[in-house]
Every structure is written in structure tokens, then in C-alpha cells.
Amino acid sequence: MKSIVIGAHLRREDVEPLADAVPAGALFLSTLPVAEQQALGDRELLLRVADVRARLLDRATFIAIRYGLTITSEADAAAKTAAHAARWKTTLEANAGRVEMTLKVAAASPRPRPNRHDFTSGAAYLKALHDATQASNVDPSFREAIERTLVPKSVQHRWSHRDEKSIELALLIARDDVDPVRAAGEALRATGVAFLLSGPWPLEVFADADHE
């Protein structure tokens, strides 16, 4: 039987009995068994994984694995994570007690998405799409408010352009600062700018030890 992988953890006890703990080098992968006939996009499975994921994060910090990775054995788990295991272990050791939160905000002056039919080559279209995405920005006064209120509560932060219409701020924070970050987010609503502050989440944006 195959299993779907949820995350990478330092200790077996961070996983069991909420999920199966599969050794993968110096780490343990949290997994759930999946029947052969069950599609990975099945709603029941998605909800079950989301529920277990949240309860695992309540227990300890872990690195989120992109949804869809499946394994069939310990050897398969080790082989599929070998290229990342050492880096993940370092990251987890350095970030024990930390989680991620994200703030997504609409771009202040989004550039229209380019029309694929206006370009003679795929490369030119992709460049135009990239340029349109990178051109989006946050209202300067709102960004200043974020930098003054949310950013100081984070260990690290990173702005990223998700698409031409929105921008996302990822925050790496101590677990004890989740409520203060939420309170700061509520205070930001007085600016009148629409945004979505979500989390806490497992490590994902900051899952690379090089970002430490």
C-alpha cells in the first residue's frame, strides 16, 4: 500500500500516533496510508491530511512536504528525500519552536496579464508574464505599516510576487508570537487595505537552511 507524505520531523514522537512515522535518514516522515483506488485529489483525503497536518503542528515544528508525494517503503522514503534530509535536519534544529505565517495583499497597481496570443514565442510570453508579476507592488503606506508592526515580530520575513495581482509576505515567527502577530494584523485593518493573514503553518518558505 502507498502512503502520502505530510511532513519531515526530527523525532518519531512528534508524529505518532497522529500519523505513521517512516524513518528517512536522520528524520521521520509523517504519512497516512492511501488505498490504491483512492485518488490523491479525493476531498475526504484532502480534509484528513489537512486535519492531521494541523494537529502535527500543534505538537512540534516540522517541514511541510508538497502535497502529492507518496512512498511505498522505508527505502522509497529515504531515496525520495536523500537530497534534502541533511538540510532539513539543520533547519529543524535551528527553528525549533518557530512557525510560519503569511499575509497576502492585492497589488496596488497590478499590470494586466499578458495575452499569450500577442507573442510569437513561449519564451517572450513567459518573460512578459514574469515582468508583469514582478511589477506589482504593495501600497507604500500599507507596506510601511506592515514593516512597522508585523516585521519586528518575526525572526525573518520575505516578500514574494505570487502573480500579477497579489503579493505575499511570509513571516518566520516564534510560536509565542502567533497571537501578537494576529493582533497586529487586526490593527492593520484600520488602514482599509484588504488582506489575508493566515497561519500558523509548518516551515515551507523558510525550509532551506541557507535562509538562516
Image (spheres, rainbow, N blue to C red):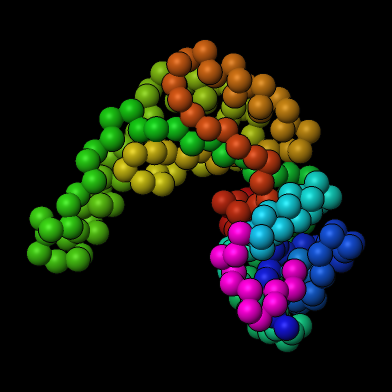
Q: Let me know if residue 131 is in the magenta part.
A: no
Chief secondary structure of the magenta portion: loop
> Who is closer to the viewer here, 62 or 190?
190
Residue 20 relative to residue 154: left or right: right
Residue 196 relative to residue 180: left or right: left
Q: Can the viewer see residue 139? A: yes
With respect to residue 207, does 70 lie above or below?
Answer: below
With respect to residue 127, does 22 lie above or below?
Answer: below
Q: Which residues are magenta?
A: 32-43
Q: Quadrant of the N terminus?
A: bottom right
Residue 71 relative to residue 193: left or right: right
Task: List x then y, in percent, for residue 13.
Answer: 90, 62
Q: At 59% across and 69% down in the image, what residue appears?
A: 40
Task: List x then y, in percent, for residue 197.
Answer: 57, 33
With respect to residue 149, does 28 lie above or below?
Answer: below
> Who is closer to the viewer here, 6 or 48?
48
Task: List x then y, in percent, for residue 69.
Answer: 61, 72
Q: At 76% across and 77% down in the image, what residue appears?
A: 25
Q: Can the viewer see residue 209? A: no
User: In the picture, residue 200 is in which quadrant?
Assistant: top right
Q: At 51% across and 42% down in the image, what residue appears?
A: 158
Q: At 39% across and 44% down in the image, what residue appears?
A: 161
Task: List x then y, in percent, for residue 185.
Answer: 59, 24
> Who is closer to the viewer here, 163 or 85?
163
With respect to residue 165, does 36 lie above or below?
Answer: below
Q: Residue lying farthest top?
A: 190
Instruction: Count up the numbered dots.
Output: 0
